[in-house]
Amino acid sequence: MMKPHGWIFACTVGIAALSAVPLRAQPAAAIVGDELRALVSGKSWALSTYGDPTNPATTMVWDFRGDGTVCARPGASKAGDKCADEGKWVLRGDLLCWDLTWFGASFGFKTVCCSVKRTGPDRLQLHSDKAPDLTYMVVRPL
């Protein structure tokens, strides 16, 4: 049996040691109150259930209008395109809630309440109130 060269062995041990240590991400900061209202009301968001709200093929564009209505568009749409469905949005405490008429029913996002967290200068995470430890959608405010 051949013995590994010293540097190969050292690299293997180093990689094994690194994989045993969990990486710590920056904590996501919850957005609440007036800051949440200002971020949502009258704004358009690119939303992705796939984790990349910059990929137009998998990103939905929604308008959270100032009058409490929401215009939902499917993936591969652009701001200004015709709404696929319209519904209502509201803030309930520190949760953003929406209720569409049909869009998202088969994927579980027709009616949702979620917390909003900032993960970067132009990145948000939505966490459903039913499973708050899981990232529900990733958002890029437009």
Image: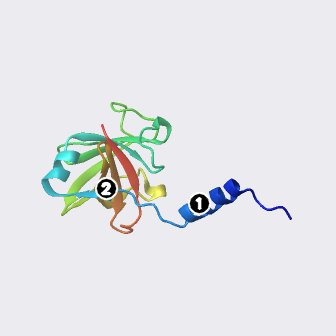
Circle 2 crowding by C-alpha within 10 Å: few under 14, some 14–19, many from 20: some
* Residue 106 horizontal/vertical position (percent): 48, 56
Q: Please tell me the numbered disc located at residue 116.
A: none
View extreme (right): residue? 1
* Residue 137 horizontal/vertical position (percent): 40, 53
Given residues 25 and 70, the one toward you in this image is: 25
User: Position of 39 compared to 111: left or right?
Assistant: left
Circle 1 crowding by C-alpha within 10 Å: few under 14, some 14–19, many from 20: few
Amino acid at pointer 1: Gly
Helix, strand or loop at label 1? It is: helix
* Residue 123 horizontal/vertical position (percent): 33, 46
Determine whether 19 is above or below 102 in the image. below
Could you tell me which quadrant the N terminus lies in? bottom right
Given residues 4 and 95, the one toward you in this image is: 4
Amino acid at pointer 2: Asp
- Report how many numbered discs are placed on residues in the image: 2
Q: Please tell me the numbered disc located at residue 14.
A: 1
Between the residue at mark 2 and the residue at mark 1, the CA separation in whole angstroms equals 50 Å
Q: Residue placed at 42% from the left, 38% from the top?
A: 54
Given residues 67 and 46, the one toward you in this image is: 46
View extreme (top): residue? 80
Are circles 2 and 1 on residues that touch, CB within 8 Å? no
Residue tagged by mark 2? Answer: 99
View extreme (front): residue? 6
Given residues 107 and 13, the one toward you in this image is: 13
